[in-house]
Image (cartoon, rainbow, N blue to C red):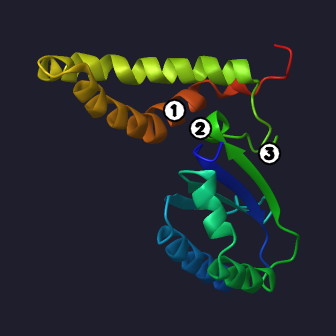
Amino acid sequence: MLLDPVTLAITRVPKLGREREWEEVMGEIQRATRGFPGSLGTTVLKPVPGGKPAYRIFVRFDSLANFQLWESSPERQHFLTRLQSLETEPVQIAQATGLEAWFEFPDDVPMVQPPRYKMIIASTLGVYLTITPLLYVLGPLLKGLPLYASTAVIVPITVVLLSYVTMPLVTRWLKPWLHAARGR
């Protein structure tokens, strides 16, 4: 569990008229987070025009241990104090680790995870769609290498493609099925 990737989904609502100042502080937080070990980045989604003035923030770390370093840091505490003075509503936070971190959460059902069997099926599809072309392209180049060496080349490429390309696409394609009512 300590080595599973962690995604923190946060919803924050700045005070009316203080959005620009709030965004500046959020930019400082993003820069500070990048300097911490294991940071995989922070994504800030602005509110939809005409909707609730809430910002959705996704903070990603490669492991729970590295996330906890950031979470307990004086820098984070300093920034949280600054943000809270600029906000109107209590912050909403949800954490996902492991497989759950690959799955997008629909806006109307915040942070409700799909059933585990659906995540396994979607992950299997993602791995298949990633590994098959990699083996086709890299297989002939790696043919003479020992198994451990060719695996050492394929695995990191697979993980990067799964995290940034394949799983976001697969979860988007399967979103209606993944987030259909339980029991389907």
Q: Report the quarter where the C terminus lies.
A: top right
Q: Where is residue 162 in the image (x, y as percent from the top left)?
A: 45, 34
Q: Is residue 157 above or below residue 85?
A: above
Residue 134 image label = none
Reading the image, the residue beneath label 1 is 167
- Mark 1 vs 2, N-terminal side: 2
Reading the image, the residue beneath label 2 is 102
Q: Where is residue 49 in the image (x, y as percent from the top left)?
A: 71, 61
- Mark 3 vs 1, N-terminal side: 3
Which residue is at a point 59% across and 38% down the rendered structure image?
102
Q: How crowded is mark 2: few (under 14 residues within 10 Å), some or many (20 or more)?
A: many
Instruction: Using the image as rendered, state which of residue 151 and residue 122 is in the foreground.
Output: 151
Which residue is at a point 33% across and 36% down the rendered structure image?
157
Structural distance between the alpha carbons of marks 3 and 1: 19 Å
Q: Nearer the viewer, mark 3 or mark 2?
A: 2
Reading the image, the residue beneath label 3 is 110
Structural distance between the alpha carbons of marks 3 and 2: 15 Å
* Horizontal relation, residue 76 to residue 145: left or right: right
Q: How crowded is mark 1: few (under 14 residues within 10 Å), some or many (20 or more)?
A: many
Q: Is residue 124 above or below residue 79?
A: above
What amino acid is at disc 1?
Answer: Met
Can I make out residue 103 in this image? no
Q: In this view, does 31 lie above or below 61?
A: below
* Horizontal relation, residue 20 to residue 129: left or right: right
* Horizontal relation, residue 77 to residue 37: left or right: right
- Mark 3 vs 2, N-terminal side: 2
Q: How many labels does the image show?
A: 3
> SS at mark 1?
helix
What amino acid is at disc 3?
Answer: Pro
The quadrant in which residue 119 appears is: top right
Disc 1, disc 2: CB below 8 Å? Answer: yes
Which residue is at a point 54% across and 70% down the rendered structure image?
33
